[in-house]
Each structure stands twice: as C-alpha cells, then as structure tokens.
Amino acid sequence: MDGFGERIEEHRRELHVHCYRLLGSFDEAEDLVQETFLRAWRRQDTLQSETGLRAWLYRIATNACLDHLRAHPRQPQLRPAPALADPGLASPTSTAVTWLQPYPDLLLDAADAVIERETIELAFLIAIQHLPPRQRAVLILRDVLGWSAQETAESLELTVAAVKSALQRARPTVKEHLPAQRLEWASAEPTAEERTTLQRYIEAVEQADPAALAGVLRADVWQAMPPQPIWLLGREAFMAAWTPAMVGPEAWGDWRLLATWANRQPTAAAYLRKAGENDYRPTWLAILRVENGLVAQVTTYGDDAFRRFGLPPLL
C-alpha cells in the first residue's frame, strides 16, 4: 500500500500509551510498538479498509503485548515491612509493581487520542497490573477505549460471553487495589490545589526546611521507590529518612527542583549540588498524589527517568 508506513506512524504515540497501560513499562512499550509495526507490515493484506486502520493496529498491538506477557510472566511482589513505619498506620497495599515506569505528560499530550487522567495515573496502572493479562486487555479495551463487547471479542478471539465474564471479574479486582478516595481526587486537568502543593513541596526541599516539608505531607503519607520494593509509611518515617539528606552533617548538598508532570500527576525533578561542585546533577524524580492540599503518596524514581522528560542534564 502506498504510504502505509506514514499512515501507521501517525498512530505511534497512542499505541505506545496503549502498550504502556498493558505492560506498565515505558521502555517495553517502545519495543512492543516496534513489534506492532513489524506485524502490521507483514499483515497488510488483512486490513480490510482504511477506515478500520486504527482498530486494526490496536488489535495487533494488544495481541503483541499479550504474547510478550505470556513469554515474560510477572506478578506484583509482596512488599517487605515498611522501613521506619509509623505504628498504627494501615498499610495501603501489600504488593509492589517494581517494573512500573513514569510517563511524561509532554508525550501524553502528543498522542492522537485524548488520554484521560483516571486511565493513566499511577494508582490505576498499579491496580490493573494485578489482573491476569487477558482480563487486563478486556478491561482496557472495554472501559478505557470504549470498545463494544463484540469488538473486544473479535480483537482477542474470544466469545462475547467470555469478554463479559472477564470484565465482571476484572472490575472488582481493580477497585480493591485503588486508593479509597480515588474518585474524589481524580481530575481531568491539574488543579490549582495540586500546583500549589507541588510548589510548597519544591520550596521545602530547596530551602532545606524539614518543618515545611512535614507540613505538606499527610500523616499517613507513603513513599514507594520502584524498581526496589522499598517503601516508607507515615509522615514520621518519611521525615526520618529524608531530613538527614536536607540538613545536618550528613546533608547531601544543595537542592534545586524543577516542576513537571507525569501520568497526569504533579512531579518534581530533583537536582543535587554536592559540596565542592559547581553543577546540580539529576538525582531523583518524585510523582506526587495530592489529596485535600497535602501529599498522600510519593513515588520516587532514579535519575534514569530524566531522559524521557526532556529535562536538562545539568543545572
């Protein structure tokens, strides 16, 4: 077909988001989009009409991801006891999705399709990783993309009854693993409250002010640190771990933080200037979940995440 490569390339970003939802990994999603395009080239003769190109590509991408998950099975890991946990605080989850990677909003905005916040936020991605791959695919096709049961069945080579059954099993599992207040804090666009909270968080770290940082955290805040199954539970535990990095004889140095957004959530990219150095170097990326003007969860990634966000290599 003339121009076939250009036509499928137009769907690259939205297919990448689709594979990312299924896999939870930004890097693996890139590989599976390439696999999707390779399969599409080989199967051009199965495309019945140009109007069906997008759905045809989604079908190929979905099955490529399912093949990948069958070849590389994985399950969320049981978390060890939280480091320095505050006594009396209930654990928000007992498992960790250690392969989960962040997705820059800059790239989400470049997708052809509208990427709703509630379908890309970290909490949702973590929840759906608890589903068996085929149930996950059914839920994404039906509840995220809005496909009919018939379209989903044809895509996955299932019966309509099997699709309906899979969806009925998937929805309660996802709900079980979502935060209790999730429907209250999900929003289509960044809110003024989130922007203000992010700025307070940034200023507290840059000014090395433990009291200000504690003031922006919920009492039951928790921090996850993929890919390690390490976590902190509670404000006291959070501050016990991070205060030495900010002040005192063990302080790491001076901090500068840049505001950005990942998975439709407020995010801070931290740069550190150690004693005797001139430059601030990438150190960690923190994605915040904000509830009622306070940080309820922090998901922290290492400096290897910076390359996806177009962030400067030095400050």
Image: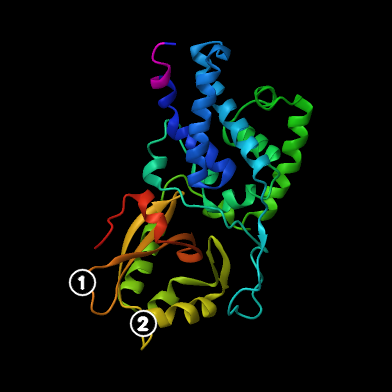
The answer to whether residue 55 is above or below residue 220 is above
The quarter of the rendered structure image containing the C terminus is bottom left
The answer to if 4 sits in the magenta stretch is yes
Q: Which residue appears farthest toward the left when viewing the image?
A: 278
The quarter of the rendered structure image containing the N terminus is top left
Q: Residue at x 39, y 42 (%)?
A: 107
Q: Residue at x 58, y 58 (%)?
A: 98
Q: Which mark sits nearer the N-terminus, 2 or 1?
A: 2
Tell me if mark 1 has few (under 14), some (14-19) or many (20+) residues whose alpha carbon lies within 10 angstroms of its own. Answer: few
Residue 148 locus on image (x, y percent): 65, 25
Q: What amino acid is found at the position of numbered circle 2 in the picture?
A: Ala
Determine which residue is flagged by label 2: 251
Depth order, front residue of 196/174 = 174
Q: Secondary structure at mark 2?
A: loop
Total residue callouts: 2
Depth order, front residue of 247/201 = 247
Determine which residue is flagged by label 1: 278
Q: Secondary structure at mark 1?
A: loop
The answer to whether residue 84 is above or below residue 67 is below
Give the magenta part as a residue range. Answer: 2-6
Residue 288 locus on image (x, y percent): 46, 60
Q: Which residue appears farthest toward the bottom when viewing the image?
A: 249
The answer to whether residue 207 is above or below residue 34 is below
Residue 70 picture quarter: top right
Depth order, front residue of 65/151 = 65
Tell me if mark 2 has few (under 14), some (14-19) or many (20+) residues whose alpha carbon lies within 10 angstroms of its own. Answer: some
Q: Residue at x 56, y 11 (%)?
A: 48
Depth order, front residue of 230/242 = 230
